[in-house]
């Protein structure tokens, strides 16, 4: 499934996927985190170095801002495998069951849960 996601949506997904699992899940999570994070090209085009350093002294990148000071979001096409979609949907559905969904999750819910595609439905329910 190919989806166009903004950086804010991608950060939202990074926050809801599990942090650990068995070896197969860990490999899948590694791949998914790499896919959702900004690419080198995106960092070059859409981020700037924060003049303040992180707590550990490292340089931090932040999204560029417009002339009014608002962060500038950008969209990119991302292709997800069936296994990745299952992990994303499980994370969203778990938050929903716990009644912990926030307004920032609505767009992700609409994309990944309400817009289920054929073939992925069967995989997600098994």
Image (tube, grey):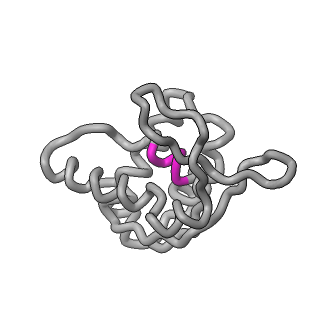
Residue drawn at point x = 40 percent, y = 67 percent: 80
| Residue lying farthest to the left in this orientation | 23
Q: Is residue 55 inside the magenta stretch?
A: no
Image quarter hosting the N terminus: bottom left
Residue drawn at point x = 39 percent, y = 43 percent: 17
**Residue 102 versus residue 43 in the image, above or below:** above
Q: Is residue 41 visible?
A: yes
Image quarter hosting the C terminus: bottom left
Residue drawn at point x = 63 percent, y = 51 percent: 63
Tell me residue 35's x, y (percent): 39, 61
Tell me residue 119's x, y (percent): 37, 71
Tell me residue 13's x, y (percent): 48, 48
Q: How many marks?
A: 0
Q: Is residue 13 inside the magenta stretch?
A: yes
Residue drawn at point x = 21 percent, y = 49 percent: 25
Tell me residue 121's x, y (percent): 40, 63
Closer-to-camera residue (47/14):
47
Specify whether 18 is left or right of 25. Answer: right
Q: Main secondary structure of the magenta part?
A: helix
Closer-to-camera residue (33/48):
48
Q: Which quadrant holds residue 19?
A: top left
Specify whether 12 is left or right of 122. Answer: right
Q: Can residue 93 be seen in this view?
A: no
| Residue lying farthest to the right in this orientation | 68
Q: Which quadrant holds residue 115?
A: bottom right
Closer-to-camera residue (88/35):
35
Segment tinted magenta in the rendering: 10-14
């Amino acid at each position: 499934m190919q989806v166009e996601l903004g950086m804010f949506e991608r950060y939202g997904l990074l926050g809801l996927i599990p942090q650990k699992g068995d070896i197969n899940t860990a490999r899948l999570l590694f791949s998914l985190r790499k896919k959702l994070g900004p690419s080198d090209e995106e960092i070059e085009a859409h981020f700037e170095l924060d003049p303040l350093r992180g707590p550990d002294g490292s340089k931090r990148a932040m999204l560029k801002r417009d002339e009014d000071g608002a962060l500038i979001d950008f969209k990119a096409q991302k292709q997800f495998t069936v296994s990745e979609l299952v992990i994303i949907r499980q994370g969203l559905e778990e938050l929903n069951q716990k009644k912990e969904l926030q307004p920032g999750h609505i767009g992700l819910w609409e994309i990944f849960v309400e817009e289920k595609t054929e073939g992925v439905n069967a995989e997600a329910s098994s």
